[in-house]
Every structure is written in C-alpha cells, then in structure tokens.
Image (cartoon, helix red, strand yellow):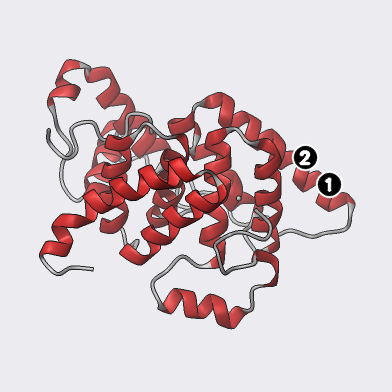
C-alpha cells in the first residue's frame, strides 16, 4: 500500500511530563539542554499531554496538563490552537469538551490573579488563491510531495475536504508552526490507538518537518508513561517500522 494512500483520515500531568522532568520546576538551563539534544523541550512535552488527553477525553488529566502548559509559558492562543486543530483528528465533541475545560481553567487562574500570556492571533488567510489551491500547496509542502492515491479517487470529497479545510483553513493558520502541529497530531493519534496507518504517516511527516528521532522516541515514552502501556507500546512499534528505512541508510 502506498505510504500516503490513507494519509490523515482520522486526522498533559503536573509532575510527569517525562520520566525525568517536572514541569513546573524545570530550570531554563535544562530546557536549553533538551533543545540542543534535539529532544522535545518542556513546552512541547506539555503539548504532547494536552493533545493526548484531549483525544482520549480524559478531562481531569487534561485540566492538569493545561495548568502545566500555562505554567511553562505556553500562551492561551497556542493552547487554543492545539485544541481547535484536534477536532480534525479526534472529532468536534472531544475538541469542544477540551476547549470548555480550558476556558474554565483560564477563568479560574484569572480569578486567582494569575496573568497568562494571551499570545498572538493568526493573521488572515491569503485571498489570491482558492482555498483548494492554497490547501493543496500546503499539503505538498508539509508532506514533501503531492499526495495522491486510489482512496481519493474512490472518495473525491474527502480529498477536497482535506485540502481545502485541514490544509487550507487549519494548517494555513500562521500562529503555530507545522512542526508543533505535527507534535500535537502524532500525540493525539498515538493516544487514541487503532490508527497505525495514520500514525505511521504522521511519524514520517513529523520527521520531514524537523522532529528528530530522539524527540519521537521521547514522545512515545511520554504516551506510555502518562496515557497507557498499550498505547505506548503500539506507538513504539509503529515508530520502529517508520524509522527502519532511514536507519538502514544511516540517517538519524
């Protein structure tokens, strides 16, 4: 089956962002070391858990993850962007529940005198091209080649919706880079389980957009530690399958 044939069809905890990281007490020097080691930084680890618990519908753990993300310096708009994007992968109900949870968290923190950064809004989408062309261009840049396949010939509507809406309306928003969007997407897919084909595709797309092998392994470890053993083990198997060709060629 072609690698991208079924591409993208489906589309964290206070003291446990990773086995050796405590979110609220992490020193800046440690965050810098993580970045230099090509692993996920503290904010990215928070996004992993926010996305995973949103996709699972675990509101108590999501609330803790949202608090942690804000304490680490994620802006309100960055978190909102993750939660909005995930409706394309986990569905509107999960996204809406997560956004409602986040709204309550923000209100409670404001009432306590905690000032969280609002962050920047997305700028207007371009108008010189149709959304179909804009989304198609984004999809090709994100993946590294045009995405075609028998499935899209069988159901042209899903191809149009993916191009115009997912890659146009959502991935076309410029207040979050594609690497971060892929971290969120991969985390959600891994947490939901049963989406091996989509997860493998997104592992590949994540690598293409700058997520290192070490960072993906770290992401999977976070899923296993915080979401569940089975979800983590399944994701690890898919990751190994994804990385095998590159390893044979000596690429990291």
Residue 34, relative to residue 124: is it above or below?
Answer: below
Q: Nearer the viewer, residue 52 or 205?
A: 52
Residue 121 visible in this rendered orientation of the protein: no
Instruction: Choose top left, top right, bottom left or bottom right for residue 19.
Output: bottom right
Mark carried by residue 164: none
Name the residue located 31 percent from the left edge and 36 percent from the top edge: 196
Residue 218, relative to residue 26: is it above or below?
Answer: above
Instruction: Choose top left, top right, bottom left or bottom right for residue 58.
Output: top right
Residue 129 point in image, percent of width and height: 29, 38
Tag 2–tag 1 contact (CB < 8 Å): yes
Q: Are there few (<14), some (14-19), or many (20+) residues within 10 Å of tag 2?
A: few
Mark carried by residue 104: 2
Q: Is residue 3 left or right of residue 22?
A: left
Residue furthest right as drawn = 112
Q: Quadrant of the N terminus?
A: top left
Residue 143 point in image, percent of width and height: 23, 47
Q: Nearer the viewer, residue 42 or 236?
A: 236
Helix, strand or loop at label 1? It is helix
Q: Nearer the viewer, residue 113 or 8?
A: 8
Q: Which residue is mark 1?
A: 108
Helix, strand or loop at label 2? It is helix
């Amino acid at each position: 089956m072609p690698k991208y044939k079924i591409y993208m069809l489906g589309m964290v905890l206070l003291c446990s962002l990773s086995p050796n990281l405590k979110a609220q007490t992490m020193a800046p020097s440690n965050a810098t070391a993580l970045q230099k080691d090509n692993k996920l930084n503290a904010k990215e680890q928070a996004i992993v858990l926010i996305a995973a618990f949103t996709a699972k519908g675990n509101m108590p753990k999501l609330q803790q993850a949202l608090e942690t993300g804000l304490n680490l310096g994620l802006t309100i708009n960055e978190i909102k962007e993750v939660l909005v994007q995930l409706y394309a992968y986990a569905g509107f109900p999960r996204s809406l529940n997560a956004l409602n949870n986040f709204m309550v968290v923000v209100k409670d923190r404001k009432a306590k005198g905690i000032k969280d950064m609002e962050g920047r809004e997305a700028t207007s989408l371009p108008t010189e091209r149709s959304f179909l062309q804009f989304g198609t261009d984004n999809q090709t840049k994100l993946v590294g080649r045009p995405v075609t396949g028998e499935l899209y010939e069988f159901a042209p509507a899903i191809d149009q919706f993916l191009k115009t809406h997912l890659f146009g309306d959502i991935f076309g928003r410029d207040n979050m880079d594609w690497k971060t969007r892929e971290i969120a997407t991969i985390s959600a897919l891994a947490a939901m389980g049963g989406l091996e084909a989509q997860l493998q595709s997104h592992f590949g797309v994540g690598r293409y957009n700058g997520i290192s092998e070490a960072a993906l392994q770290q992401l999977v470890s976070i899923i296993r530690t915080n979401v569940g053993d089975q979800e983590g083990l399944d994701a690890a198997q898919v990751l190994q399958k994804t990385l095998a060709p590159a390893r044979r060629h000596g690429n990291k």
